[in-house]
Amino acid sequence: MSATAELIIEGKSYQLPVVEGTENEKAIDINALREQTGYITIDSGYKNTGATKSAVTFLDGELGILRYRGYSIEDLAEKATFLEVAYLLIYGELPTAEQYAAWENSIRTHTLVNEDMRRIFDGFPVNAHPMGVISSLVSAMSGFYPDSYNEKAPDRTEMHIIRLLAKLPTLATWSYKKSQGHPINYPKNDLDYSSNFLQMMFALPVANYHVDPVVANALNTLLILHADHEQNCSTSTVRLVGSSRANIYSSISAGISALWGPLHGGANQEVIEMLEDIKADGGDVSKYIEMAKNAKTTGFRLFGFGHRVYKNFDPRAKIIKKAADEVLAKLGVNDPILAIAKGLEEAALNDEYFVSRKLYPNVDFYSGIIYRALGIPTNMFTVMFAIGRLPGWIAQWKEMRAGKEPIGRPRQIYTGATSRDFVSIADR
Ligand code: ACO
């Protein structure tokens, strides 16, 4: 017999079904709760709320496990390419050699962006943050592919998916080029995904540009580590926006906006700025540890520390820390910020405040150090995260639509004024 949970309200007992996942996670199904009892549940920040059933990504925050479609993040980061992982997330299985060749080729040949998008881009000021820019440009793509929002047109979702994956790196490099006063580079479709991005970022018309394989490999690993993370803030945003049947471009654009926040993907930029501040302040990490411990009065948080679900360690942070050491050594980069980061981590891991609150380095703590070593400017870090997370957003959006999930529409407990009579302006 399947398990049920008993809820007693005002002396009356209700039986609620229990839902169990393939990794034995359990949930109490409250779908009929309001109808049966008149009550709703309150769970600010959704700490205990499962918004959906999903077969894309599994994570266990206590054990520090992360798997995409059943494959461990450690294996994928070491053995796969980013586009292989993208295929896995979106279609559920690793591609065969033939499927991979077709998939990679489609993405490779759709990197060019409509020239009219450039006119939209040209309207942005030179110092506009690239996250705001790519969110706007991805949203604007719906205008160039109107079948994305015409529900009567034949379904072209697969084409939109290819376009998003192919064009986001192109769009992402525009802001950087503009900030440098350099001409933008067109994609070169004989290059692989990571190399093409690097070429668009760093090549100049006056010299030949050779992609360093160490840099391209490191980028490939970072993109894989960021590719999905189940129902996080930006992914939930993508699913919620998509649940209104908004098109895939608007839904992904909303996800990019959610990712930008400093408590989410924006933390990678904040980490480097924080480490820079500590360096400029003489490198005394203990002062910043004390400030973070008094977060309530100082308002200062140790960026790159803590996670809503990982309460042991973030498996991605482990891989990135090792990769940071390797990449910096291979590139011959000696970044004093790395020593500060390690000092900060060691001090925090031995401090009762952080230990008792289970605050460990998250994926963003070391990613910025690698990005810096690769030559990526700080304000582009969150954009790199967005390029990495794109396949996850797409996979989750597709799953939500295929599952015909109802429109997302939370309820509330109203705490405002009760009914009162209108007073005309002359009498107020
Ligand atoms: N520095 C100092 N104290 C912290 C930190 C931090 N980075 N993170 C949490 N705390 C403290 C809180 O003040 C709180 O203390 P209290 O119990 O005395 O009130 C306690 O730890 C629990 O914190 P919450 O904010 O309730 O935890 P929550 O799960 O809501 O937040 C979050 C998780 C947002 C990631 C938080 O740890 C944080 O702000 N970290 C810094 C920003 C960051 O690195 N974000 C990236 C997350 S990973 C990602 O999105 C890719």
Image: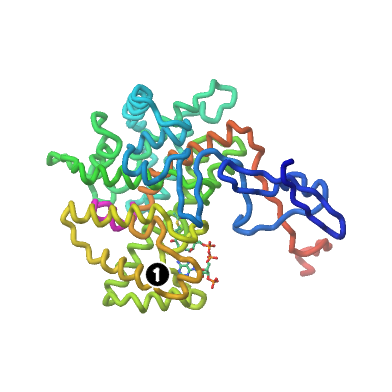
Q: Is residue 358 left or right of residue 31?
A: left
Q: Position of residue 227 (x, y in %)?
A: 41, 43
Residue occupying the point 59% across, 26% down:
151
Q: Is residue 103 above or below residue 269?
A: above
Residue sitting at the far right:
11
Q: Measuring 45% from the left and 31% from the top, which residue is drawn there?
A: 93
Residue 364 lies, with reference to residue 89, above or below; the image says below
- Residue 171 picture location, percent across and down: 35, 40
Residue closer to the observer: 324 or 35 = 324
Which residue corresponds to the image point at 60% horizontal and 57% vertical from the top-left?
Answer: 47
In the picture, which quadrant includes the C terminus?
bottom right
Q: Which residue is mark 1?
A: 349
Q: Which residues are magenta?
A: 368-380
Say whether residue 374 is magenta: yes
Tell me which colouring the rendered structure shows. Answer: rainbow
- Residue depicted at 26% across the width and 35% down the height: 186
Q: Position of residue 254 (x, y in %)?
A: 51, 45
Q: Looking at the image, which residue sits at the far left?
A: 207
